[in-house]
Amino acid sequence: MNRVAEVKRTTKETDISLSLNLDGNGTSEIDTGIGFFDHMLDGFARHGLFDLKVEVKGDLIVDCHHSIEDTGIVLGEAIKKAVGDKKGMKRFGSCILPMDETLVLCAIDISGRPYLSFDGEFTTDRVGYMDTEMVKEFFYAISYAAGMNLHLKVLSGGNNHHMIEAMFKAFARALDEATLIDPRITDVLSTKGSL
Ligand SMILES: [Mn+2]
């Protein structure tokens, strides 16, 4: 059984359609209007082995803020929907991912409780047409919409493109692990009995 979700969200600022298959193979079709952000979402799908379709029509005439933040909200909602009752799911996932000089840590608990810990500083305002300050906003939106404890930390960095890309890939691998179904887990992995 594939765990899939489709989410559509329309506001005066953005119009977003997204579909996610947690049990995919890394196929993606991404068009957000922001080239570097497309590149990041493509890497997320590929390295998390998710199938991901994203179409965003946003108010880029203002700036990239609404488009990126709202994509985070919609992706978070899709993750929440796709994991369903979390039965048999590993729940925790983590990854330390290198990219040349950069090393990024990501740890996740799909606990139902939102929390973001973000430790990373960028030295340029933008990469391509993406504002670097939107990286934190994007992951904040995901953690809150998905109900996920998400820690992201740049352990060592340098190049801004590398730091951001390593964050997306580390997040993808940690999320892949956390959402994996383990046959030894016969119910929901919590002493409370639900997540
Ligand atoms: Mn790249």
Image: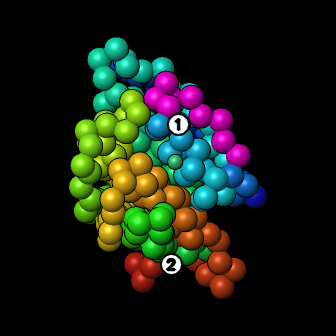
**In the image, is 83 to the left or to the right of 95?**
right
Determine whether the residue tagged by mark 2 lies in a helix, strand or loop.
Answer: loop
Residue bearing mark 2: 189
Q: Residue at x 51, y 58 (%)?
A: 169
Q: Quadrant of residue 25?
A: bottom right
Q: Which residues are magenta?
A: 27-35
Q: Quadrant of residue 121?
A: bottom left
Determine whether the residue tagged by mark 1 lies in a helix, strand or loop.
Answer: helix
In the picture as drawn, the residue positioned furthest to the right comes out as: 1
Figure label count: 2
Evaluate whether residue 141 shows in this view. Answer: no
Q: Could you say where residue 91 lies in the image, as x and y percent from the top left?
A: 50, 72
Q: Residue at x 47, y 65 (%)?
A: 100
Q: Residue at x 59, y 44 (%)?
A: 42
**In the image, is 22 to the left or to the right of 162?**
right
Location of the C terminus (image quadrant):
bottom left
Q: CA distance from mark 2 to mark 1?
A: 34 Å
Q: Residue at x 49, y 24 (%)?
A: 33
Residue 158 or residue 135, whichever sits in front:
158
Point out the tag, 2 or 1, that comes first from the N-terminus.
1
Residue bearing mark 1: 38
Q: Is residue 76 above or below residue 114?
A: above
Q: Amino acid at mark 2?
A: Leu
Q: Amino acid at mark 1?
A: Asp
Q: Could you say where residue 16 lies in the image, as x and y percent from the top left?
A: 49, 27
Residue 87 or residue 21, whichever sits in front:
21
